[in-house]
Image (spheres, rainbow, N blue to C red):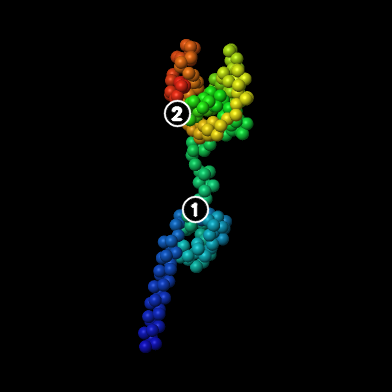
Amino acid sequence: MMKKTLATLAVVCCMVVGFTSYSTDAATTYTYYKVKKGDSLYKIAKTYKTTTSVLKSLNHRKSDVLIVGETIKVPQLVKTQAAKQAEKPASQKPKFSICAEERKLMAQLVHAETGFSEPFAGKVEVALVILNRVKHPAFPKSIKGVIYQKTKSGYAFVPVKTGKLTRIQPTKQDYAAVDQALSLFPNDRRGSLYFYNPKIMKDKWMLSRSVTIRIGNHVFAK
């Protein structure tokens, strides 16, 4: 009876050991690492944020000895959010940032040019015109430079010419339009560089520009 009991326990123990070993291997998402000169289990464990015990279990070995050139299993590192952000393609990363002063200046111009009558999309497009000009080689390389650009007739934007711009108090919607434009830039496909009211525009050169979109009372062109 005693022998039969011991035999049963031995079988159960073997099953438990086998199940534990399998579970450890299956539950760990792993990759492979080729051992280099100077490596040790401790050093590799530290690199992969694990322990030597886990490495031994994962590779089914008792010894700490490593052979240069051999391949062992190591836990797959889980990337942090910061690491994932750093690996994003350049196209997904913000390429253009502005300071609070520039943001306010843009919002002032947006309000001066659109007031309360133009739709939100029109406000966004006006903000994009400013940003697209900064990007374009034919215009100044800063937001302030673009907004205060001098021309033969005075300034590029009428509100600057009349002195109205500095008196403008932008609304939340104007600021939101600037922020929306920044989120679209520099991947804005239309590339609008100009805008005008077709009811009052008489300049033949401006009217000859390629139209990108019409929003509200404005025609946008490039």
Q: Which callout, 1 or 2, points at the residue further toward the start of the chain?
A: 1
Q: Quadrant of residue 144?
A: top right
The answer to whether residue 166 is left or right of residue 44 is: right
Mark 1 in CB contact with mark 2 (< 8 angstroms): no
Q: Which residue is mark 2?
A: 189
Q: Which residue is mark 1?
A: 78
Instruction: Work out how far the residue at label 1 is from the one at label 2, CA to CA, in angstroms.
Output: 36 Å
> Which residue of the protein is positioned furthest toward the front in this rendering?
116
Task: Give the quarter of the figure containing the N terminus.
Answer: bottom left
Q: Please indicate, yes or no, whether residue 40 appears anywhere in the rendered image.
A: no
Name the spot of residue 80 as percent of width and height, x first.
Answer: 52, 50
Name the spot of residue 124 as percent of width and height, x first.
Answer: 50, 29
- Check the image and report above or below for 45 versus 145: below
Q: Please indicate, yes or no, whether residue 183 appears anywhere in the rendered image.
A: yes
Q: Residue at x 47, y 65 (%)?
A: 57
Q: Residue at x 53, y 25 (%)?
A: 115
Type of the residue with mark 1 = Val
Q: Residue at x 52, y 48 (%)?
A: 81
Name the spot of residue 87 as percent of width and height, x first.
Answer: 50, 43
- Check the image and report above or below for 59 versus 198: below
